[in-house]
Amino acid sequence: MTAAPLKHLLHDDDLAAALRADVRSGLSDDPKWLSPKWFYDARGSELFEQITELPEYYPTRAEREVLTAHAGDIASVTRAKTVVELGSGASVKTRLVLSALDDAGCLEAFVPLDVSAAALAESAHAIAADYPRVRVQGIVGDFTRHLSSIPGGGERLVLFLGGTVGNLLPDERSQLLGGLRAVLEPGEWLLLGTDLVKDPARLVPAYDDAAGVTADFNRNVLRVVNRELGGDFDVEAFEHVALWNAEREWIEMRLRASRDMTVQIPALDLTARFAAGEDLLTEVSSKFRRDGVARELAASGFALRHWWTDGQSRFGVSLAQAQ
């Protein structure tokens, strides 16, 4: 079965407007920030795929270990007919779940949602080719804005993997989980991947690898601003910094100005001034504990039914049911 044409809820004009709004807000704020969503142009996506293969970056391998061990359990518990994936990307780990449900004879439809139309089209066609009995309908959209467009019915299982939920601030997580609960029927399912709190000596290198790939990925947000908005950031003049915030239990990725700089963003008629040593926050990555995950799910109307970790307890995968 071939994939259905993509359903576009986001267009180039929408993305351009969102970028302009984010950059204006972030560079005018104190302290300054830029949203991590703008890492992921073609180069940024390629760099992130390289990051997932680095020896220091354990989350991808740890989550894959969990899904490999428990995909059959997920299929037998949920008996889901429709799988919805938020921020699907290449849907690599997703195939473990899809295959288990397909083998169980219950999978009928797959609905990946992602902001990148090109990546979504490629993965949707690949999934459709490999799972010929499954209807594939990709949605080009933002999971923070377009949850209400997820098709109804079909005994759904929503996947939100990769620890991406950790890139949302607590209020944003609450809004997302609440929005998901609003579109799901009682009894439907959410499979959530969360990186776990651990020794900072293990955590920090995952965001500051020896080869410098993460540093290049972090600086890529400046290249995007330069290309799309005519900015004149001196990209290499910003040092990559990864810090563990013990109070908030999250990693902070920052770009630190190596000297005094004045940056012009012509498309916004904006001037941003950086002092030497000033930090620009680009990402937070929250780490979780089982009790905290259960509380956040419960507050949004989900009951934690199953909790699995890899053999080293680095990464947690929760199977929760809408109440």
Image: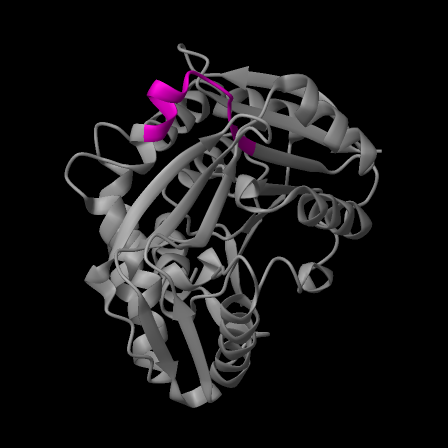
Q: Give whichever of 249, 48 is nearer the camera.
A: 249
Q: Residue at x 36, y 39 (%)?
A: 242
- Left or right of 49: which side holds 191? right
Residue ID at (43%, 60%): 1
Where is residue 72 shown, x and y percent of the image? 51, 22
- x, y percentage for residue 173? 67, 44
Seen from the viewer's position, the closer of residues 206 and 162 is 206
Please name the residue shown 45% across and 56% down the image: 36
Circle count: 0
Residue found farthest to the left: 211
Q: Which residues are magenta?
A: 193-204
Q: Quadrant of residue 151?
A: bottom right
The residue closer to the viewer here, 203 or 49, is: 203
Nearer to us in this view, 62 or 166: 166
Q: Quadrant of residue 64?
A: top left
Indicate yes or no whether the magenta region holds residue 194.
yes
| Spot occupied by residue 193 in the image (x, y as percentages of width and height) | 53, 32
Task: Decide if residue 246 is on the left or right side of residue 126.
Answer: right
In the figure, 130 relative to 257: above or below? above
Quarter in which the C terminus is drawn:
top right
Residue at image position (28%, 37%) is: 208
